[in-house]
Amino acid sequence: MISIRILSIDPGSSHVGFAVLDLTNTNRITLKHVETFNPNKHLLDVKDVIEQHGPRFARILKINQFFYELMELYKPDIIVCEAPFYNRLRPGAFKALVEVISSLQHTVYDYDPSVMFHTTDPSTVKKSVGVKGTSGDKEAIRSAISHLNIFYGDTIALEVLDEHSVDAIAVGYSKAIDLINHYWDYL
């Protein structure tokens, strides 16, 4: 049986959702791992970095360290990250997301230059799980995911996951569906 491991990301500078999904050539999608990383809880050992480069830089540094460890543990074939969305009311959030995503891509390259790094726009992710592309309703995504054909491990309970983990699952599912519909015959 052929399998592709997808590591998916819901990016942010204060919370990052990560999910690991396996897609088999029988189109079975299995969620192997999901969690939200909060870099603010890991800043005690980088006070000097905060003083020299600022708190956002330090958070991104911690995100990348955690991300690298996840890649070493789960050995993904493909990385997919939700693309940044520009909100004219919060332009600073877009800048931070671009910084985070760029640093994640550099971390993937440092880990293994042959691992593919993709981004998927938020509306495509939402549509792939059956939610209107312009919806801002996070619970709609959770509800939609609960009805998808995803197999969960015994230790994963969708109802207790936060929005970042749920979004990371949706991002990974979107890439899995994309692979099934467009690329599976070529892999």
Image (cartoon, rainbow, N blue to C red):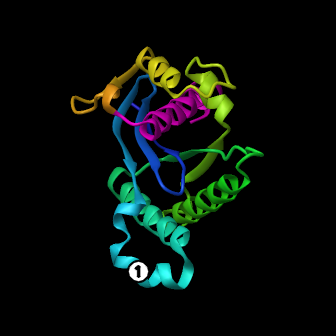
Q: Is residue 125 visible?
A: yes
Percent position (x, y) of residue 93? 65, 53
Residue 131 position (above or below residue 186):
above
Say which element carries label 1.
helix
Residue to which mark 1 is pinned: 47
Quadrant housing the N terminus: top left
**Horizontally, is 98 left or right of 59 in the view?**
right
Q: Whole-percent x and y of residue 156? A: 28, 32
Q: Residue 118: x percent and y percent? A: 62, 46
Q: Is residue 142 above or below residue 90?
A: above
Task: Tell which of 103 and 72 is nearer to you.
Answer: 103
Q: Would residue 3 appear left or right of 179 to someone viewing this image?
A: left
Q: What residue do we see at 39% from left, 52% from top?
A: 37
| Residue at figure coordinates x 48%, y 24% from the top left | 139
The residue closer to the viewer here, 25 or 85, is 85
Q: Is residue 40 above or below residue 120?
A: below
Task: Pick whichever, 181 or 33, lies toward us.
Answer: 33
Q: Residue at x 40, y 78 (%)?
A: 46
Residue at screen point 40% across, 41% down: 20
Look at the magenta stretch and give its main secondary structure: helix
Q: Quadrant of the C terminus?
A: top right
Q: Is residue 163 highlighted in magenta?
A: yes
Residue sitting at the far top: 147
| Magenta run includes residue 132 | no
**Region of the chain picked out in magenta, as a range:** 161-187
Which residue occupies the extreme front position in the image?
89
